[in-house]
Image (cartoon, rainbow, N blue to C red):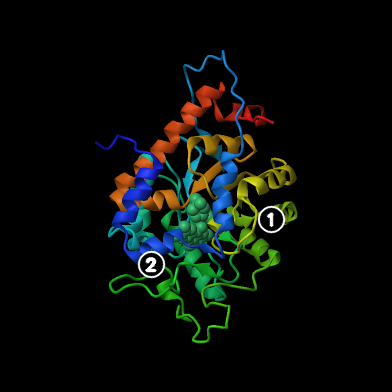
Amino acid sequence: MTPALPPLEHYAALAAERMTDLASRYAASAAGSGHTARWNEERYQEIRLAPRVGVDVTSVDPSVRLLGRRLPHPVLLAPTGCHRLFHPEGELASVRGAGEAGALFVVSSYTTTPTADIAAAARGPWWFQLNPAPDAGFVANVLDEAVARGAEALVVTLDTPVAGMRSGQGWDGVSLPDGLEFGVLRDLPAGLAPPADPEVIHRSALDAGLTWDRLAGLCAERELPVLVKGVLRGDDAERAVAAGAAGIIVSNHGGRNLDTLPATVDALPRVVERVAGRVPVLVDGGVRSGGDVLKALALGANAVLLGRPYLWGLAAEGAEGVRRVVTRLRVELEMAMALCGVRTTDEITDDVLWT
Ligand SMILES: Cc1cc2nc3c(=O)[nH]c(=O)nc-3n(C[C@H](O)[C@H](O)[C@H](O)COP(=O)(O)O)c2cc1C
């Protein structure tokens, strides 16, 4: 019998049975030989915990405060594209599952559902992620739409000026099967067709000329907080804060862009140190358990984002799968907190790490 909150491996296996070959390859693909994607997970397992016993943990509260909002726990859903490849209800199932699990949902630019429909189905806060395209008018329309529909923040992905060479994907990432279309990028005036010449590295939907000055313009133009996703270096974190970013997401894109980048949990402390509390720092990549969430927070993250694991839940059981994957991690986090002798997320410091 399936337990009420199965482990993530259960969903990985179930998803593998249910996903089309295309969806499987899209979710799993990583840059190069997949070192970075593996390190993201492995490095969490190399960090040891130092539990404090004899603490009254009759009440454990995993909630966090983020950009002025109290969230029931620190697990957010990272922007990932093409949810209709995983389940017929696509992003609608994801955003419902997120809402039921109390997880903030980040809508990807590569959504296969229009932003308006996701917004209508949302039962909790959501942010919109932008892969800036070279077309300023198009980008302005996309952002205006997201803001009008209720996005509470914008996430600008800066780590993808060009696509990486992904092993195993075997798909250009934009030619969807019949019956599916992109909810936002379908309106890109230049179209999405990959260049006919395989030696051309640039793509119509990716702005290879985006600099910190332009990001500062984006931050200044909008009332909404703008988070920068894809930062690994301390000096880039400083540039993000100087440009007006309201938050930083330490990310290597799940190891999908450039192989041999460090695991994000190794990059996190440098960014945290440089930012010194001026804006929240989030991290994604390889988070697979509540213990991993605890470790990320102990290293200074304010919250984490999940990528592949909720796609497994989506592929396996739609909204319910997403809800159960997130809930499993939240319950594991509460257990890990109690077992380490911490009652609130504010009490999670590097004191819980075995150094
Ligand atoms: C299938 C898939 C699609 C993704 N699409 C996007 C995207 O559209 N925009 C973006 O900023 N990041 C995208 N990402 C990266 C995620 O936001 C996140 O950084 C990464 O998945 C976290 O690592 P994890 O999968 O190990 O949890 C994608 C990741 C996956 C696995």
Label disc, if present, on residue 183 of the rendered structure:
2
Q: Which amino acid does label 2 sit on?
A: Gly
Quadrant in which the C terminus appears: top right
Q: In this view, does 133 lie above or below 62?
A: below
Say which quarter of the image contains residue 229.
bottom right
Q: Is residue 52 above or below residue 318?
A: above
Q: For the residue labelled by badge 1, is the local secondary structure a helix, a strand or a loop?
A: helix
Q: Which residue is the extreme one toward the front?
A: 33
Residue 351, percent from left and from top? 66, 27
Q: Can residue 107 be seen in this view?
A: yes
Q: Nearer the viewer, residue 155 or 315?
A: 315
Label disc, if present, on residue 240 of the rendered structure:
1
113 to the left or right of 125: left
Return the disc, 1 or 2, that comes first in the chain's sequence: 2
Query: Going 43% across and 43% down the picture, which residue do you hit?
Result: 103
Q: How crowded is mark 1: few (under 14 residues within 10 Å), some or many (20 or more)?
A: many
Q: Which of 329 and 191 is in front in this view?
A: 329
